[in-house]
Image (cartoon, grey):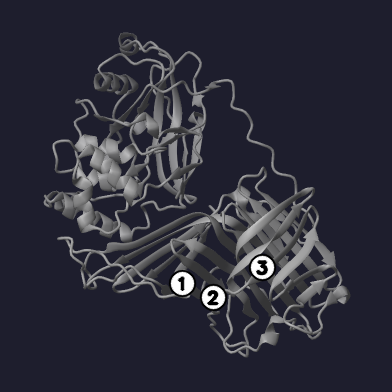
Amino acid sequence: MVYVVGMPRDLDRPQWKGQRPWFEIWFAVVLDARRRRALWVRQTLFVPRTGDGRATTWGAWFDADAVPPTRAAKRFGSLERARLDEPASGDQPLIQIEDCWLGRTGAAGSVAGLAWDVGWTGGRPVHDEVPAWLPAPTHARRIVHDAEATGRVTLGDETCEIAGRAIALHLWGKRRLPTLQWIYAPWIGDGSLEIQAASLQDRFSLGLAMLRLDGPGGRTRAPTGPLDPRGRADPGLPRRPSSLSGRPATSAHASCLVTATVAGARRLIHARAWAEPETMVGYAYRDTDDRDLMIAHSDIGSAHLEVYGRTAPGAPWRPVDERRVDGGVAVEIHQRATLPDVAYLGWDDTTRPAPAPATPPPTTDHVAWPAVSAIVALGLTYGDHVRETGQRVDPSAPPTSFTKHVRAFAPGATRVAVPDTEALLAALDALEPGLAAELRSRMAIVPPVMDYEGELAVVALDAIDDEQLDAGVAQPFGLAAANDLTARLCQVLGETTERALEYWTCAKSFTGFLPLAPTVWAPPGGLATLPELTLETRVNGELRQSASTKILIYPLRAIARAARAHLGRPLVRGDVILTGTPSGVGLRMSPLTRRFAALIKDRFRKAELLVSSFATSTELLRPGDLVEVDAGPAGRIRTRLGV
């Protein structure tokens, strides 16, 4: 969006004076303070180069607890029936199309199945950007920002009260912006975050972008700072900011995720917001060049902000702030292409198409998960992964094995929460009392450094006879796609200790850290060997791992034997074996880097360097990332990292 400096108030009003082509938009978003519901309304004028124009009222309701979670519709009117004359006072509508209106203090109207009557007052000062007199094809002006809002929304026979924050804008010009990304998060920590990026190109280039974090109520808050390695305030590092601003590099992902990064010599900011496709409302907007723009919007999204600082260019990055909010976030993506799994309302339609049919039930060779009794994980089982980690493996020796706690078991999990500093420190302190205090003295914020590991899980569907398996007799095993999520920071803290595998268990055993396919593939007659399957892992649609099970170092009988030895008993129904991950994980080290890291004996220094590397990484995971693991007939699991 292009904002305007020094505009008189009448630029909130219609700017159309009969010129062609032309578009004009007034819109408002009202986010409920409980962060589960929201209202989005628009009134638009559209005048093509030739032919009849139209006036349209748009409405959408978001309810995270409803099925479906969104309602959306619009209704058409003629330009002749749109009230475009100057309002007599500030309380009267800026735009009115039939009985629907939007003004400086509220909005009221209706579309099929949805009616609203909301008002707002107050708000933060408007931060303007670019003068309206510049010959830009699109202009925009804020009407209100971060205002206190209340009102009523009617859905058929049901009436819902809404109270929270509102933002309203007016946009106009000769051409719409084909590429736009927008985040509005008024409750992120104790501040309000807004990010916007716009370009006149079909792909983001030569555009404008802005990130702004305002402190509570727009007031300056005393900043808090990071500590030096001895726990003292470090005057050389940037302190936890009360406000932020910058020009970010932004990106919109097919996973309904918008990311933004502001990189400076001593400060690094990562901000992002996301929503699930079913909570997005999609609209086709006709541009004045007769092409359609595909707009996807949600007002019940989530957001995450992290800030890193360092004492000087080239010094290690250290975290100084982290904020997260689940719900109550507006996220919007404008582009030419549609987003996967988002339902769009066509330009000439007034209601959205019916939802796509549900996923078909599994085939007859898929069965429900048994009650899980134990989870054994194997490490360094793929030759390419061994090489990328710079390590060596003796194929004649049993594979490395460790326990993954059953609380991590999450078949069909579509969302897994990333542990915050407190959860991470609690887990580490349970493993090693006093460790949390030592870490806290060194880092104000302790990020988990999340990573993915696409794997094939072997599931015992009944008692397993090892001798029969060694003789080549099939056993009642099933298979399932799995994602062995890992908090690498925990893992690194154990590298120089005699209990390294216990730290692996800690790193991989947070609640939900084992998303699996919703059902188990149970080949008829069982398995004596692993079938040749292709295992693929994607992050936000990007292929990260792709390997065949034929490059596994160990056969099924060796895998089962290692799990039995680890458990100290025969395998029984409900035992799960994770067979290891191929190359392509987020944390990768060349043999040279691995040898250099091995020279560092101070585990806290290792952890600090890992966090510094994570600060600039585009391979490791952050909240909002969508990870998909596909193992063909063994199923697929698609999981969003949440907050």
Give the camera-side residue of 33 and 461: 33
Residue 534 lies, in percent from the top left, at 44, 35
Q: In this view, does 9 lie to the left or right of 56?
A: left
Q: Is mark 2 on a helix, strand or loop?
A: loop
Mark pair 1, 3: CA separation: 20 Å
- Tell me, for residue 214, which label it has, or none: 1
Q: Is mark 3 on a helix, strand or loop?
A: strand
Which residue is the site of mark 3? 28
Give the camera-side residue of 421 and 256: 421
Give the vertical position of 604 relative to 321 (above or below): above
Q: What's the residue at 70%, 86% (across, down)? A: 10
Give the vertical position of 253 relative to 88 (above or below): above
Give the vertical position of 521 relative to 303 (above or below): above
Label 1 crowd (10 A; few <14 / some 14-19 / many >=20): many
Name the amino acid type tagged 1: Asp
Name the amino acid type tagged 2: Arg
